[in-house]
Image (cartoon, rainbow, N blue to C red):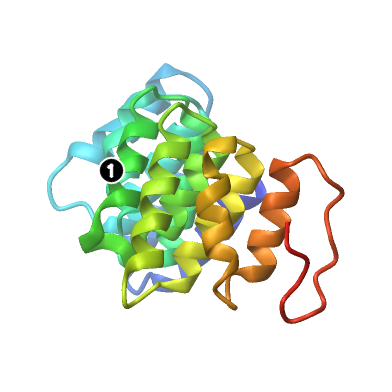
Amino acid sequence: MEEEFRVLLKRVRAELVSPAEFTAYERLLALARTDGRAARDELAEVLVAPEQPLWAREIAAFALGVQGDRRAFETLVLLLNYREPVRCATAAYALARLRDPRTARAAAALATNPLRTAYAVHPVRLLTELRAPESVPALLSTLERLLAARDHCWPVARACVEGLGLLGDRRAEATLVAAREHERLRPAAIVALARLNGRPLPTVRARNGPRG
């Protein structure tokens, strides 16, 4: 079983308090470890059954997502937009492996929503990993908005800068130059511009850095 799933299970197990919850947890774990359509169908039922706890839906969605079962899509997108970063990270990992064509559009909608900026780090990183047509426009739109805003939301802005460097699209050059003017983004922007221009990655030490 993948390390990410083991981390998820350990986290969930620490949340359980009643014998009934432990029993349900063990049943889900057995299903997740079982190959075949029947086990996946039972996991998919957990996603739509009423009064299921969030942790149960999370386990079922992750197990289905990494197996490429698109019935997990809606739940994983919900978790990608959740208020707890650890759940967002788990959902992003599974979505990247789900290979659903709707994923990039959903991640772009979350990344560019100005009302959800505080939760946008993992959608931004997911867009970078997907390398989809939506990735560069969404990261550019988000970064340009954050550079102009009073609250720059540095973790999200930095994730955009790093992502644009990895994606290597020259449409990002002017925005990365603007990002370089912000001290907290400068090291990441210098590296991103070096990637964009095909230069060796610099070791950033000086406060102002090289003017790439």
- 4 vs 140, left or right, is right
Look at the image and tell me in which quarter the N terminus lies: top right
Q: How many numbered marks have been drawn onto this rendered protein structure?
A: 1
Tell me: residue 42, above or below residue 87: above
Residue placed at 40% from the left, 32% from the top? 134
Residue 144, position in %: x, y? 39, 56
Nearer to us in this view, 158 or 100: 158
Dividing the picture into quarters, in which one does residue 205 lie? Answer: bottom right
Residue placed at 80% from the left, 79% from the top? 206
Tell me: residue 26, above or below residue 38: below
Nearer to us in this view, 62 or 98: 98
Dividing the picture into quarters, in which one does residue 119 lie? Answer: bottom left
Residue 175, position in %: x, y? 50, 53
- 66 vs 49, left or right, is right
- 206 vs 192, left or right, is right
Residue 67, position in %: x, y? 51, 27
Q: Is residue 211 visible?
A: yes
Residue 154, position in %: x, y? 47, 72
Residue at the limit of the structure toward the bottom, as seen here: 207
Q: Is residue 63 visible?
A: no
Residue placed at 48% from the left, 41% from the top? 127
The amino acid pointed to by label 1 is: Ala
Residue at the limit of the structure toward the left, as seen here: 50
Look at the image and tell me in which quarter the C terminus lies: bottom right
Residue placed at 52% from the left, 61% from the top? 178
Reading the image, the residue beneath label 1 is 109
Nearer to us in this view, 205 or 88: 205
